[in-house]
Image (cartoon, rainbow, N blue to C red):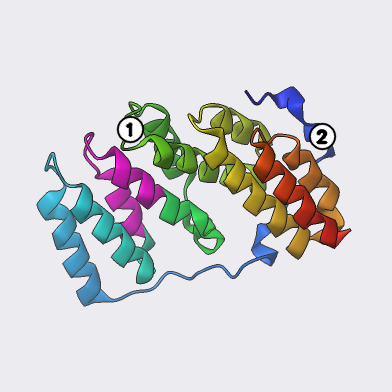
Amino acid sequence: MFTENSINLKSLPSWNYEEWTKTEPKQTNSLKEKLLLRSLELIRSETDNEEACREIVDKALDARLFDIAFEAVRSFSKRSEYYLCVSINAVFEEMGYWKHLSEEFVDYCEQRILKMPVEDLSFEQRSQSLGYLGRYRFFTGRPESAISLWSAADNSQDVDEVIAEMCETIAELSPEYVEAALILVDLMKTNKIKAKTMANLSQYV
């Protein structure tokens, strides 16, 4: 289990992730908005709406209609754990979307994932979602929240894969902070991912 004492939080820099990626601007397209909103209204209250919600999230993100994408994430029924995780991953994996996220929406995603009943179908996706949610918290200045989210994952390998991506991002785009990446490496539980990540980081020092 991760703990806040696992890393020296005070030693971590303040990340300026906006320097690493271009913020994706919101777009407007009245006809596309009407189609997506109408689709959302049709399936919002359905008990088996996961495929439709996922399609709406994907199409809205592609069109940079972020408000619709985020509302579609909120509309997944309680029986839609797997595709809810897939859609949350799509939102949080892309740093260019982060400026459009509200604290309320992030909290909602965290609580949905944390309260999700663990089933075989959603096992891997749930852990990956907690990995990406923790990644968001880490790079936006709340590493203690990141550690808490990662600790709640059911599969440490899925979290470690996300942390490995984070280490490479730091080393490649902010090489002056490679030591911070090494702190993250110490959190990993999967030896093969940890070893591969350390070998990869060696090229930056």
Nearer-N-terminus badge (2/1): 2
The picture places residue 141, in percent across and down from the top left corner, at: 67, 43
**How many residues crowd mark 2 within 10 Å: few (<14), some (14–19), many (20+)?**
few
Q: What stretch is highlighted in magenta?
A: 67-88
**How many residues crowd mark 1 within 10 Å: few (<14), some (14–19), many (20+)?**
few
What residue is disc 1 on? 120
Q: Which of 32 and 189 is in front in this view?
A: 189
Q: Answer whether residue 122 is magenta in the image.
A: no
Q: In this rendering, is residue 139 above or below 111? A: below
Q: Distance between the residues labelled 2 and 1?
A: 38 Å
Please say if the residues under marks 2 and 1 sit with CB atoms less than 8 Å apart.
Answer: no
Q: Identify the element where label 1 is drawn.
A: loop
Q: Can residue 197 be seen in this view?
A: yes
Q: Answer whether residue 87 is magenta in the image.
A: yes
**Relative side of 7 to 149, left or right:** right
What residue is disc 2 on? 10
The picture places residue 29, in percent across and down from the top left corner, at: 29, 76
The picture places residue 79, in percent across and down from the top left corner, at: 21, 35
Q: Specify the quadrant that holds the C terminus.
A: bottom right
